[in-house]
Amino acid sequence: MAKARGRGKPVRRRDKKGGPGSGRRKPCQHCRDKAEQVDYKDVAALRRFISEKGKIRSRRITGACRRHQVQIALAVKRARELALLPYVNEGGRDDSPRRERGDRDR
């Protein structure tokens, strides 16, 4: 005779409580301030939307709405073009020679 499996009520994903995905999505900072356009000359504000390596952060991380995220990306690109922001941060590059997987310092 086959072993009986626990065939109780199936657990649904949406019934899950807690965890990293729970909670309310933070509102867009620009919508809260009622800003129509993102200014490319406001370098201090744009630095919050750039990672340590110089990449533009995603909407999921920044909390910006779709409309303002597009404006942020364009403003960052324009500020980079005018040399207000760096393309790559100075600490992002490693000049040391690359090692293969098996190499170790002993």
Image (spheres, rainbow, N blue to C red):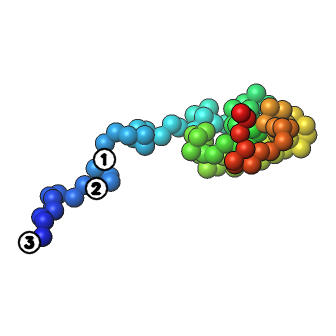
Residue 62, quarter of picture = top right
Observer-side mark, 2 or 3, equals: 3
Residue 18 visible (yes or no): yes
What whole-number distance in Å separates the C-alpha atoms at marks 3 and 1? 34 Å
Q: Residue at x 80, y 45 (%)?
A: 98
User: First in sequence: mark 2 or mark 3?
Assistant: 3
Disc 1 target residue: 16
Disc 3 target residue: 1
What whole-number distance in Å separates the C-alpha atoms at marks 2 and 3? 29 Å
Q: Do the residues under discs 1 and 2 have CB atoms within 8 angstroms?
A: yes
- Give the percent coordinates (x, y) of residue 81: 89, 44
Q: Residues within 10 Å of mark 3 (few under 14, many from 20)?
A: few
What whole-number distance in Å separates the C-alpha atoms at marks 1 and 2? 7 Å
Q: Residues within 10 Å of mark 1 (few under 14, many from 20)?
A: few
Residue 54, quarter of picture = top right
- Give the percent coordinates (x, y) of residue 45: 72, 30
Relative to 102, is 24 on the left or the right?
left
Residue 72 visible (yes or no): no
Disc 2 target residue: 12
Indicate the amino acid at tag 1: Lys
- Give the percent coordinates (x, y) of residue 73: 73, 46
Answer above or below: position of 96 versus 10: above
